[in-house]
Image: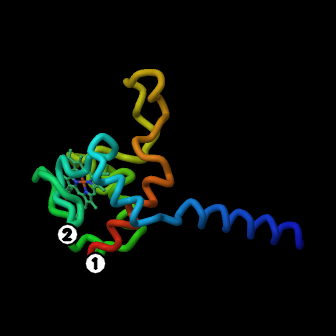
Amino acid sequence: MRRILAWTGFALAAGAQAQEGDAARGRALLEKRDAANCVLCHAIPGVGGVAGTLGPSLAGVGGRFDAAQLRERVADPSRIDPRVAMPAYFRREGLERVAPQYRGATVLSAQELADVVAYLSTLK
Ligand code: HEC
């Protein structure tokens, strides 16, 4: 029994760790255009430079959505709307027609996704 409890505790801790994002790192990642390049389509408060307008401004997005909802929207927006013009940043399925080194790889790592979500959560 104790062993099961210890194992469950470990699993929970590991899960929580993967969710822990750093807003400063997230902002830095958003500013690096070669990485996520969200500014190609979104104006993002606190992230400088010219921004595209294909997507809505992300001002106030942290007030409209909680962290789980933000995560879902960045990880795989097609789950919310299959016709969405935004790429999935954390999805492995459906990536067969890519160069071998990218097969099964996500655009953002789990940590980067958590960092981006942490920054978006500050935009209230
Ligand atoms: C190719 C253009 C494009 C790129 C690149 C892009 N998005 Fe989007 N995004 C969109 C569009 C279009 C929508 C609107 C979807 C809808 O409402 O159906 C959207 C919606 C969103 C929303 C929901 C906003 C709301 O108010 O409903 C969030 C959050 C978001 N994007 C975050 C991001 C982040 C973070 C990145 C980078 C990791 C990113 N997007 C990259 C086009 C893009």
Residue 40: percent from the left, percent from the top? 18, 46
Q: Does residue 38 lie above or below 105 as drawn?
A: below
Q: Residues within 10 Å of mark 1 (few under 14, many from 20)?
A: few
Give the position of the C terminus as an image quadrant. Answer: bottom left
Find disc 1 in the rendering and name its residue.
Answer: 63
- Residue 52 is left or right of residue 18, and the answer is left
- The quarter of the rendering in which ligand 1 is drawn is bottom left
Residue 6: percent from the left, percent from the top? 82, 69
Residue mark closest to the camera, 2 vs 1: 2
Residue situated furthest top in the rendering: 100
Q: Does residue 53 lie above or below 70 as drawn?
A: above
> Which amino acid does the dot numbered 2 rest on?
Ala
**Image point 74% across, 70% down: which residue?**
9
- Residue 4 is left or right of residue 99, and the answer is right
In contact (CB < 8 Å): disc 2 and disc 1: no
Spatial distance from mark 2 to mark 1, Cα to Cα? 9 Å
Q: Quadrant of residue 117?
A: bottom left
> Which amino acid does the dot numbered 1 rest on?
Gly
Q: Does residue 3 lie above or below 39 as drawn?
A: below
Find disc 2 in the rendering and name its residue.
Answer: 59
Query: How many discs appear?
Result: 2
